[in-house]
Amino acid sequence: MIAAPILAGSLLFSAVAVPQDPGTRQATGVKIGEVSATSAIIWMRLTKHSSRNAEGPDRVGQPVEPVPEDAEVPGLRHACPGAPGRVRVRYGTDPGLEGALATDWVEVDASTDFIHQFALGGLRPATEYHFAAETAGPDGAPEHTPLLGRFRTAPPPDEPARVVFAMNTCQMYKDVDHPDGFEIYEAIGRLSPDFLVTAGDIVYYDNEDPRARTIPLARYHWQRMYGFPRHIELLRHLPVYFTKDDHDLLSDDCWPGLDPPFMRPMTFADGLRLFREQVPMGDGPSYRTFRWGKDLQIWLVEGRDDRSPNTLPDGPGKTIWGAEQKAWLRRTMQESDATWKLLISPTPIVGPDRENKRDNHANTGFAHEGREIRRWLAEHLPENAFILCGDRHWQYHSVDPETGVQEFSVGAASDEHAGGSPGLDPEYHRFHRLAGGFLLVVVDRPGGSPTIAFQHRDVDGAIVYESVARSPE
């Protein structure tokens, strides 16, 4: 079903990416993460220059050997070399930052890729905050032009509120569809959502050139992805919840203990550490949940930290999530009184998927746990829980024939990266599209009755499919 667009509020985003001020030293921008009703994390990185390298060797496409030496990485095209110095955040509710609070200055150096993450607490619910991400050289001189941003905290759990969020996945650098960054970043910005969920495969360490066989090369993948002007512009205004999958951790279909020779000396443990370095997630478990008002709660599940090897025979003991995470998920989903409960997974749970895949709940590799999850959702949350997934490079809305559990796949970040679908399956699919784009979710109460709309959108933001659910209450 295709419906007229449901606009997501006032258009606060410029349709043109704003060039970096030459006085700034934040060529990879800022990232706002883990926003709740009372807290947020601001991620900052001090860089040597105000923008990414415009010149230098351009390593793009399929991996080729040899990879650059670590000392060569800062000179690659679109690298954003870091620089030592100090950083802080000033923040408050006044757009001009009159009376703003300020964090302490923190020294940054190469040991953390010149990154620091500021945890802000004591914030007011449903409130717009403005901030200045400030940087300076060693010992406080010189001071640079700050990077300005804003975000809105979540409404309290007893307050009905319109909430709009976007979700994307699978953003391969070689398939970026505009010189300034992905088209979807500009399209998402025009809709002014409250937050974005990025569902893994944010970068591709293993099958993009240069293969990230060392920590400096892995960091380079993040620098060039978040040095695009469009990406910087959107993320200084839009909070993001980040989840990881295989390619932004180590290699395709990876699990703890896997040590592929073509990635050495990079290890699984290195990938775990670097992901938390490069995105604002905090120190808690990778799986977590966030409440956005009376009608919406999201659960972000972790699919790599505790998974069994894909090569093990399937059965009751084989797991992607692990016993601790599954117990947490069941307990917190049942305890929640949110009208709509969204389980957000980096990989599919319903599918269907390709026959040659073995690493997710929608295929034979983890079929036992997949059935267990779908049956539990159908039994305990039959009318108000939905699954949103990343990983697959095509968009779909599927309904599990056995349980009726519904799943929405986001699709790849560009048309160039779309592909791999086994095709339309009428037994499952209510919608299937082999093209790039993103998902927009709109929670509202038109006429006082809670609704949730799932909108598949193309790379330019046009709705190509919409499914709307209404609360039985």
Image (tube, helix red, strand yellow):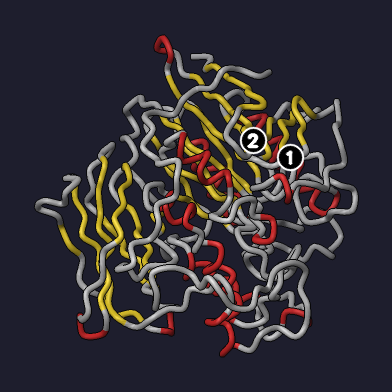
Q: Amino acid at mark 1?
A: Ala
* Residue 75 placement: quadrant: bottom right
Between residue 77 and residue 210, name the one nearer to us: 77
Quadrant placement of the N terminus: top right
Residue for point 47% across, 46% down: 289
Between residue 321 and residue 349, name the one nearer to us: 349
Q: Which residue is mark 2?
A: 458
Q: Tell me whether circle 1 and circle 2 mark residues in contact (CB < 8 Å).
A: yes
Q: Is residue 321 visible?
A: no
Residue 370, percent from left and from top:
75, 45
Residue 163, percent from left and from top:
42, 31
Residue for point 64% across, 78% down: 57
Residue for point 60% across, 29% down: 462
Q: Give the side of residue 402 with respect to residue 91, left or right.
A: right
Q: Which residue is mark 1?
A: 435
Q: Give the side of residue 267 with respect to residue 318, left or right.
A: left
SS type, badge 2: loop
Considering every residue shown, the one lying at the far top of the view is 447
The crowding category of the residue bearing disc 1, from other C-alpha atoms within 10 Å (few below 14, some 14 to 19, many at least 20), is many
Residue 84, percent from left and from top:
34, 83
Q: Earlier in the sequence, mark 1 or mark 2?
A: 1
Q: Give the side of residue 4 with respect to residue 230, left or right.
A: right
SS type, badge 1: loop
> How far apart are the alpha carbons under marks 1 and 2?
8 Å
Judge whether 201 appears above or below 422 on screen.
below
* Residue 48 placement: quadrant: bottom left
Q: Is residue 352 visible?
A: yes
Residue 113, percent from left and from top:
45, 78
Q: Amino acid at mark 2?
A: Asp
Judge whether 101 appears above or below 152 on screen.
below
